[in-house]
Amino acid sequence: MDEPLRTDVAVVGAGAAGLYAALVAAEQGASVALVSRSPLAQTASYWAQGGIAAALAAGDSPAQHADDTLTAGREAARASAVRVLCEESPERVRDLQRLGVQFDADRGGSLALGLEGGHSQRRIVHAGGAATGRRITRALSALAATNGRVRVLEPLAATAIASHDGRAAGLTLRPRDGDPLALSARAVILATGGTAALWERTTNPRGAVGSGLSLASDAGAMLADLEFMQFHPTALRLDGPRDGFLVTEAVRGEGATLLNADGERFVDELAPRDEVALAIEAELRRSGEPAVRLDMRGVDVERFPNIAAALAEVGLDPSHDLLPVAPAAHYTMGGIATDLDGRSSLPGLYAVGECACTGIHGANRLASNSLAECLVFARRAALAATTEPALSGAQLAAEPDTPAPPDEATRAALWGQAGLRRDAAGLSELLDDPYPLARLIGAACLAREESRGAHQRTDHPDTDRSLDLMHTLVGKDAAPSFERWQ
Ligand SMILES: Cc1cc2nc3c(=O)[nH]c(=O)nc-3n(C[C@H](O)[C@H](O)[C@H](O)COP(=O)(O)OP(=O)(O)OC[C@H]3O[C@@H](n4cnc5c(N)ncnc54)[C@H](O)[C@@H]3O)c2cc1C
């Protein structure tokens, strides 16, 4: 390996969290290396539809937003992190506006605020209808590309975190072809996205297989709450490549309804996601059908042009047709365990965005809280990372073997054994899976012997109140343990 490249802050991942962390660190005067292995259009951030939750309406407040988040989290969310999220997300929305993102406005020119499941107020800012992620990431990406302090390194995959004196000191980076590179840094910020594409049926880009969680765990950092995978209720159920395409919750906020095989409504469409997904799963079991129907016929489709365009590709017209939908793996509530400034348990290593577990989502993420989390905690982590001490003579670790990517058998096993309903017999099979992260997910699911939010055990159907506010922590070689985060 050649002499290492050097930077103050290495950021892995160029979705909303990584881009924003890179820009904030650069604004602090740090040199930043922004590493990404795939194009912007293959990030979950680019695909985000509904928007960003922020208490901006006159009758709203961060305290009400926090109450809704804690309620959705099913007594498993971390109150301190929720408070930070809800208090700071309005200012982060204003930051984006200052950086040039144009959010949709109402007729009076004020921000148009959408309503989504579990929110007691209209508080979702959006751009281009349901093109919010695309608009935000394009703007941030253009700023990063032209920022003199940000060096964009792509397409390169981070394949190992280098440690020195018990702290993260850099990365090993692998191009598609050619030799690996070493990058040394005072701090490493992982912003690598979630794990939902480890499940066979998913709304996520194929690359969302939790590579940052694997890197962090291999380097010795703790992971938390891996048993909490959110299943989005309304992903298209089709044969072909559009299977899993997400139809945003915002359409239900605008009046779309869900109909069962008898053409009847069966759930409050604006209940939190775990409830709606479970109600759909129960209907599918009852009817033996592969999908329920989403009725968008009363919704102004022009407000959701990218959804209408995607549906047109598969011959569906939402103003006339009922849409076949069913749950799909969508969002990783767990991740790399962090404090309120994104610090992991390994000094010098930070995690932000969907790869992190700040604890704000508990057992069930409230809609549109994740882009807010990306921005709020990316900023906090970037500010903290730029104060890390300079390294002297760091030795970068030798390149370990890159674990083989997860295969279809792993994806089928997670969907089958760690889906909307699980039990010990099925989960135990995951402990032998060849993909290490699947084994850790299996272990975390087994440890939580109760049902709560997104984690429903048929062999433990009740909620165990002694586990309220308890989070599972798991290390590479350690059995899961429970810890209370305040
Ligand atoms: C269809 C869809 C709609 C959604 N809608 C909303 C919404 O309306 N509101 C909301 O709040 N949330 C929404 N979400 C969730 C939200 O989009 C994500 O949680 C969030 O965007 C994650 O951002 P991120 O920056 O953490 O990761 P991502 O945007 O997934 O970016 C990950 C980055 O890491 C890179 N990467 C990964 N591993 C490596 C590696 N080893 N080396 C180098 N680079 C690596 C990838 O190439 C990518 O650049 C939606 C998600 C989906 C899939």
Image: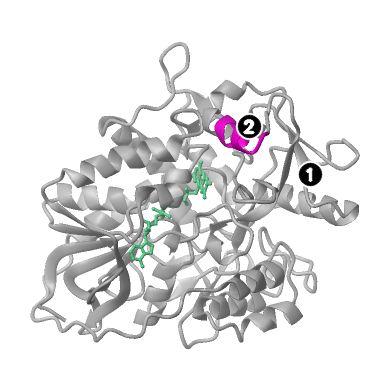
Image: 404 above or below 270: below
Q: Is residue 314 magenta?
A: yes
Examine the residues drawn in magenta and state their main secondary structure: helix
Q: Look at the numbered disc 2 and give the secondary structure of its residue.
A: helix
Question: Can you give x and y, in whole percent of width and height, for residue 331 in the image?
Answer: 55, 56
Task: Tell me if the residue at label 2 has its CB under 8 Å from ligand 1.
Answer: no
Question: Can you give x and y, in whole percent of width and height, for residue 478 in the image?
Answer: 49, 87
Task: Tell me the amino acid under the disc marked 2.
Answer: Val
Which residue appears farthest toward the top when viewing the image?
Answer: 108
Q: Which residue is mark 1?
A: 292
Question: Can you give x and y, in whole percent of width and height, for residue 434 in the image?
Answer: 55, 83
Question: Can you give x and y, in whole percent of width and height, for residue 470 in the image?
Answer: 57, 69
Q: Magenta stretch: give its range.
A: 308-315
Q: Is residue 352 magenta?
A: no
Q: Alpha-carbon neighbours of circle 1 within 10 Å: few (<14), some, or many (≥20)?
A: many
Q: Answer whether residue 20 is visible to the viewer in this image.
A: yes
- Does residue 31 appear left or right of residue 255 in this picture? left
Distance (Cα) linking label 1 and label 2: 16 Å
Q: How many numbered marks does the figure carry?
A: 2
The quadrant the N terminus occupies is bottom left
- Does residue 455 appear left or right of residue 267 in this picture? left
Q: Which residue is mark 2?
A: 251
- Does residue 352 appear left or right of residue 253 in this picture? left
Task: Tell me the amino acid under the disc marked 1.
Answer: Val
Question: At 75% from the left edge and 75% from the top edge, which residue is drawn?
Answer: 423
Q: Which is more toward the observer, 189 or 35? A: 35
The structure's colour scheme is one colour
